[in-house]
Image (cartoon, coloured by chain):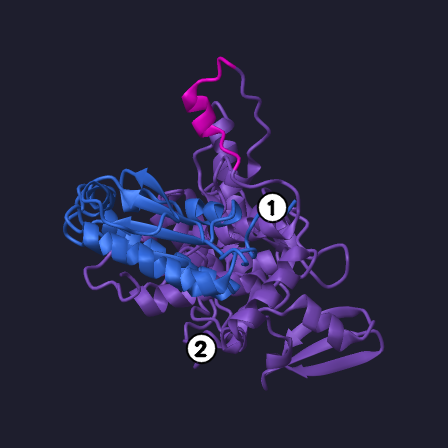
């Protein structure tokens, strides 16, 4: 079992000793059950830190923000940042390390094992609650979530409340850490790509109909891009602005300002945006499910990334986020890569 | 008589092999369908997936990426990177629901003018029954 006191103790220690600038973790949100990210600078505040199955956020995005902030400072504080990570989040750190975006000494990792469960899905929870307000959620020893609501408790089997990605998780404990809380036993997942099966069994026409319906909803708020720890480019390809070409515009200026995608949220442009995003995350996405969680229109974005994760595994035997020394998927090749599709 | 549908193919040809191959087909006066719009790139490995999506977005009925045979790349290993990347793009386009025939990759060397004409003729024949590509075409 994970004891949150151990986490607080360690956070207090590293803050007191001045080993880290601050600790990023989870704290109780103002709005009932769901937590919010906490940034703790003062060792006295560590009691704010919590850990429970509602801690869904992938906090590694803040490491990317930290790096960008540091780049703008004249005399940056070179100390590392403490961060609370789950198994999936730790894989995001591995990918950032692999790409040399951050260094290992920039981060002090407080890893927490999800043990045999994972985190909950807010939408599934809302369905179970039927309008009631949850106050607390705990896992009992039989593998059920016990939700305390006003005037009683609701008991729900874990599988019915866990996020889809947790049911298919292949790293339920952190891969990289400075401190590990909880068990390091591997969760048995027989079908890591089960959620894709239904999609793949559809015909080409049905798949097209499905994606047109889903991506037509997209309002291009770019929440999926903002929340993704892998989307760290300073300039995004879909952010190209209208560019006035005059007689003295140089060729290199024109070449650098190509407008690949229109900003209008129409299906044809949404397709380009989401396909580009999927391609950019191929072999990098670690399936933290944040893009899907933050999508205000409930577009199942995870499928796109999961599909490419599956192909990377099946075609090239590549697993993202396990080994920081491995070359990335598209910057490496093997002689025996499949080429049966090439004429 | 109703006019027959003539597909438009955008072909990204690498400068060192496939483009020279198409050149050979031209100077040898080999007959092949005029449906292809060749774009010479420095290497098949330099073809970004965005070029492919953009070609479809601008109304291409089919896209072909062609490079040197494995081991023949002018830049030693560009076509190996391309092979991996294009395999993923192909899977993605298929997953989205685009007809898989619309996107092809081939190896054409500078001596294979004949093969190049064959690939283009086959590609055109495959695209004709599919009709125009409207799925990813820009529609604003």
Chain B colour in the picture: blue
The residue at the point 51 percent across, 14 percent down is: A247
Q: Earlier in the sequence, mark 1 or mark 2?
A: 1
Badge 2: residue crowd in 10 Å (few <14, some 14–19, many ≥20)? some
Along the line of sight, the residue nearer the viewer: B49 or A145? B49
Image x and y of residue A211, in percent: 59, 63
Image x and y of residue A286, in percent: 45, 60
Along the line of sight, the residue nearer the viewer: A197 or A225? A197
Image x and y of residue A33, in percent: 73, 64
Question: Dividing the picture into quarters, in which one does residue A150 lie?
Answer: bottom right
User: Which label is found at residue A39?
Assistant: 1
Query: Could you tell me which chain the residue with mark 1 belongs to?
Result: A
User: Which label is found at residue B136?
Assistant: none
What's the magenta region?
A247-259
Image-based side of A268 in relation to A95, left or right? right
Chain A colour in the picture: purple
Badge 1: residue crowd in 10 Å (few <14, some 14–19, many ≥20)? many
Asked whether A253 falls inside the magenta stretch, the response is yes
The residue at the point 35 percent across, 55 percent down is: B86
Is residue A27 something that shows in the picture? no
């Amino acid at each position: 079992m994970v004891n949150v006191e151990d986490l607080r103790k360690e956070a207090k220690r590293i803050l007191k000793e001045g080993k880290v600038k601050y600790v990023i973790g989870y704290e109780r949100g103002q709005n009932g059950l769901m937590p919010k990210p906490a940034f703790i600078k003062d060792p006295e505040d560590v009691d704010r830190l919590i850990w429970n199955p509602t801690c869904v956020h992938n906090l590694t995005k803040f490491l990317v923000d930290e790096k960008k902030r540091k780049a703008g400072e004249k005399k940056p504080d070179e100390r590392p940042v403490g961060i609370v990570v789950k198994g999936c989040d730790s894989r995001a750190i591995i990918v950032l390390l692999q790409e040399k975006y951050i260094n290992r000494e920039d981060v002090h990792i407080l890893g927490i094992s999800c043990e045999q469960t994972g985190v909950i899905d807010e939408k599934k929870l809302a369905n179970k609650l039927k309008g009631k307000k949850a106050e607390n959620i705990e896992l009992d020893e039989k593998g059920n979530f016990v939700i305390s609501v006003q005037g009683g408790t609701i008991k729900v089997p874990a599988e019915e409340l866990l996020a889809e990605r947790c049911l298919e998780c292949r790293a339920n404990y952190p891969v990289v850490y400075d401190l590990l809380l909880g068990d390091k036993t591997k969760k048995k997942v027989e079908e890591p790509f089960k959620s894709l099966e239904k999609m793949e069994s559809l015909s080409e026409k049905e798949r097209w109909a499905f994606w047109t319906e889903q991506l037509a909803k997209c309002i291009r708020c770019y929440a999926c891009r903002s929340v993704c720890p892998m989307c760290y480019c300073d300039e995004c390809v879909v952010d190209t602005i209208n560019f006035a070409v005059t007689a003295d515009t140089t060729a290199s200026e024109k070449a650098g300002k190509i407008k690949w995608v229109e900003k209008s949220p129409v299906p044809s442009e949404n397709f380009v945006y989401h396909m580009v995003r999927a391609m950019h995350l191929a072999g990098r996405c670690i399936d933290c499910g944040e893009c899907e969680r933050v999508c205000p229109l409930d577009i199942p974005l995870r499928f796109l990334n999961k599909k490419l994760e599956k192909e990377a595994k099946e075609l090239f035997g590549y697993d993202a986020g396990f080994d920081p020394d491995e070359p990335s998927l598209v910057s490496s090749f093997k002689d025996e890569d499949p080429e049966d599709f090439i004429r | 008589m109703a006019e027959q549908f003539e597909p438009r193919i955008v072909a990204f040809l690498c400068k060192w092999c496939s483009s020279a191959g198409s050149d050979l087909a031209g100077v040898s006066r080999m007959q092949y369908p005029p449906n292809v719009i060749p774009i010479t790139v420095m290497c098949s490995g330099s073809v970004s997936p965005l070029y492919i999506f953009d070609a479809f977005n601008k109304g291409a009925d089919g896209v072909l990426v062609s490079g040197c045979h494995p081991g023949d790349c002018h830049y030693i290993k560009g076509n190996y990177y391309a092979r991996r990347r294009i395999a993923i793009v192909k899977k993605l386009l298929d997953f989205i629901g685009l007809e898989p025939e619309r996107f092809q990759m081939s190896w054409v060397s500078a001596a294979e003018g004949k093969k190049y004409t064959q690939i283009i003729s086959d590609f055109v024949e495959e695209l004709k029954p599919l009709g125009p590509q409207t799925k990813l075409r820009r529609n604003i």
